[in-house]
Amino acid sequence: MSSKPLVVFTPSGKRGYFEKGTSILQIARQLGVDLDSVCGGRGICSKCQITPSYGEFPKHGVTVSADALSEWNKVEERYNDKRGLAKGRRLGCQACVQGDVVIDVPAESQVHKQVIRKDASVRPVKMNPATRLFYVEVAEPDMHEPSGDLERLKKALKEQWGIGDVELDFFQLNKLQKTLRQGNWAVTVAIFKDHTATRSSIVEIWPGLYEKGIYGLAIDLGSTTIAAHLTDLKSGEVLKSAGLMNPQIRFGEDLMSRVSYSMMNPGGDKEMTKIVREAINSLAEQLTAEAAIEKKSLVEVVFVCNPVMHHLLLGIDPVELGQAPFALASSNSIEVSASDLDLSNMNSSGRCYILPCIAGHVGADAAAVALSEEPNKSEDLVLVVDVGTNAEILLGNKSKVLACSSPTGPAFEGAQISSGQRAAPGAIERIEIDNNTKEPRFRVIGCNLWSDEEGFTEATRKSGITGICGSGIIEAVAELRMAGLMDESGLIGSAEATGSSRCIPEGRTYSYVIYDQSDENGPLISVSQNDIRAIQLAKSALYAGARLLMDEMKIEKVDRVVLAGAFGAHISSKHAMVLGMIPDVPLDKVQSAGNAAGTGARIALCNISSRSDIEEMVGKIEKIETAIEPKFQEHFVAANAIPHKLDSFPELSKVVNLPKVHFNIGSDNKKRRRRRKL
Ligand code: FES
C-alpha cells in the first residue's frame, strides 16, 4: 500500500496517489480531471470549487477522515467572507490533500460539462469552448531589461498557462498598455484556440479579474428567416433567442431568384451581403441588450446556412452556384474575424466559424444537421430530412452516409397555397376530417381547443382564423385522402361524387371548404386543386430525393426517419406518410429532431472538437446531385400519386385504410354544363 494519500474524483472516477500537501487543483490537472480555473490557482476566481466527501466509501475502498484535507486557509476565509462559499465546498486550488479523500467536482466547476437540453430527443451538448478566459499577472516594465508590454504578457501566458505563440489583434494592441496599468499588471484575457490547435489569438483583455463571462451566437441563417441564440460560453446555457425575416427576401423569395438577381444586377450580390450583415448586427444588438451584456463580451459566432447564404454572408458572388457544376468558392469550413464580416455589435476581434458545405446544393446547414443527428454513428439505416424551401436529405449508418438536396419549393411552408400563410397565431395547424360526415374540425396556432370544442370561438376571437400554415396544409391534404374526398392521383371529387357540400366547384376543378365566413366579410379558407398540385410537387421532390439515395445505397427500405427543421417538429408522421413525403416505416420510427441545424450550430459553438468531427464527417459524406441524375425525374413522376404510384406502404396500411376512390373531374363538370343547357 502506498504511503501517499489516495485521491478519488467523482463523477470521473479518476484516482491516484499524491504527496501530502499537493493542492486538489494540481492533482486534478495531473490526472486530467476536468476542474476549471481562470485565475490559475490564485484563489480569486472561485471556478475551482470542489466538494470533499467524508466517511466510508466501500465502492472506492477508502475511508475519508475529517482531516483528509488541509484546514481552511486565509484565502478561502476571505473568499467566503466576501462572496460566500456554499456549505461543504472548498476551493480546489487552496485545499491540499492530507489523507485519503473522495472529491466531487460539481457540474459548474467542470469546463467540459454536459448541458442537458430540455428536449430529450436532442442529444446533450458537451462544453469545450474555443474561447476561454485566463487570468495572468504580468511583470512590470524594467528599464534595465527593456521589453514590450505585449512580450511580457505573452511570457506570462506561457509561464502561467503554457500558452505559447499567441497572436494579438491590432485593435487589442491599441488598448493593451492602458488595460495592463488599469489592472495593476493583472489582466484577464479571452483567448481563442483554433480547433486544429495551430493558432491562439487574444480576443479581448480586461483589467484585473474579469468575471462577467463571455458569450457566443449560434446563428441559423436561412433564406427565409435568421435565428440567433445567445449562448453562455461557460455554462452552454442559451440566454436569449431572437429571429427575424431574412431581408434578402426583397431580392427574391427563393435561392435561385437571389442568384439571378446577382447575375442580372451588377453589384447585386454586394447589396445582399450588406443587408444580411446588417440584419445579423441588429440581432446581436437586440440580444446583447436584452441579456444586459457588454458587446465586447460577445466573442464568437457560429453560422450554419445553405451554400447561397454562405456565399452572400462572406461577400462572395453566388453566381457559380446557379449553374452546373455548382462549384462552391470553398467547401471547407471558414473562420474569419467579426470585423471581416462587418459585425460591429460584437467584439471586433471575435471569431466567426462557418461550418463546411457538403456540396454546391447541400450546405453548411445540412452539415449542422449531420452534426446534430450523427447518422454516421447510427447502427440502423436512418433517413434524416430537413424540410424547408429546399429539403436536405441524409441517408446512412456507421458504414456510409449519402446526402442530397431536393428542390421542394415553399409549399411546405404555406407559401403558394391559396389560403396559405406563415405559422402565426390564427393559422390552422391541425385538421381532422370525419370519414362519415366529411366535416372538418381544426386547431389554430395560439389556441389549444379544437374548433368544435366549447370556448373555441371566444379563444380565437383575437387572432381570428386567418389561413393554413405548412403543417396544416399537409394534414389537410392527407385528411382529404383518408376521408375519400380526394383520390390517389390528387383529384378532389365533386359534391355529388363525394357526398360533401364542402366540395365546391372552382373553374374545372373542385376545392374543399374548411372554414367559410365570407357571408360576414370574413375569410373563406379552402384547399384548392392547385394547392394539392403544389403539395404534390413538393412531396414528390422530397420522396424522389430520398429514393435516389436509397437506390445509391441499394436498399428498398430504411429503418427510421428523422424529420428535422422547425417545420419537421410540427408535422404529424402519420399525415406525412399518407401523403407519401417519406418512405414507409413503422410510425413509431418517425422522429422529430426539432431545429437540428440550430442544434448543430450550438454544438459547434460550445464544443470545439465537434468542428473537427464535422469537417471529417463532411469529407466522407458522398454527395448525390439530384439536378443531373436522370432517375430523379422517374422517381419524381411515380411519387406524384398519393401516397405513391408504385411503392407500397405496408406499414402505413397497418394503421390507415385508404379508400379506393376515383374521380373524373372533367366528366362531372361536363355533365353539369350539359344539365345547365337543358
Ligand atoms: Fe481560481 Fe481556485 S483556481 S480560485
Image: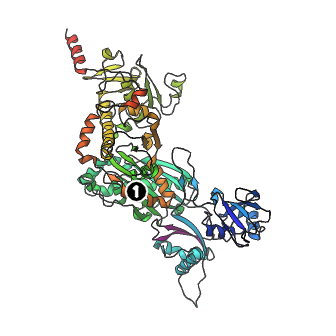
Q: Nearer the viewer, residue 120 or 328?
A: 120
Which quadrant holds residue 502? top left
The picture places residue 264, in percent across and down from the top left corner, at: 23, 52
Give x and y (percent) for residue 339.
43, 65
Number of marks: 1
In the displayed image of the protein, which residue is found farthest to the right? 66
Image quarter where the N terminus lies is bottom right
Q: Neighbour class for label 1 at 10 Å: few (<14), some, many (≥20)?
A: some
Left or right: residue 299 versus residue 552 is: right
Q: Quadrant of residue 263?
A: bottom left
Residue 179 x/y as whole percent: 57, 73
Q: Tell which residue pokes out farthest to the top in this image.
A: 678
Segment colored magenta: 184-211
Depicted 270 relative to depicted 583: above or below: below
Residue bearing the label numbered 1? 617
Q: Is residue 324 left or right of residue 173?
A: left
Q: Residue furthest front?
A: 1
Q: Magenta segment: does it hold 197?
A: yes
Q: Is residue 410 above or below residue 20?
A: above
Q: Nearer the viewer, residue 291 or 195?
A: 195
Asked which colour scheme the image uses, the reply is rainbow
In the displayed structure, does residue 615 sit left or right of residue 93?
Answer: left
Residue 664 appears at what percent x and percent y?
A: 25, 20
Three-letter amino acid code of the residue under disc 1: Met
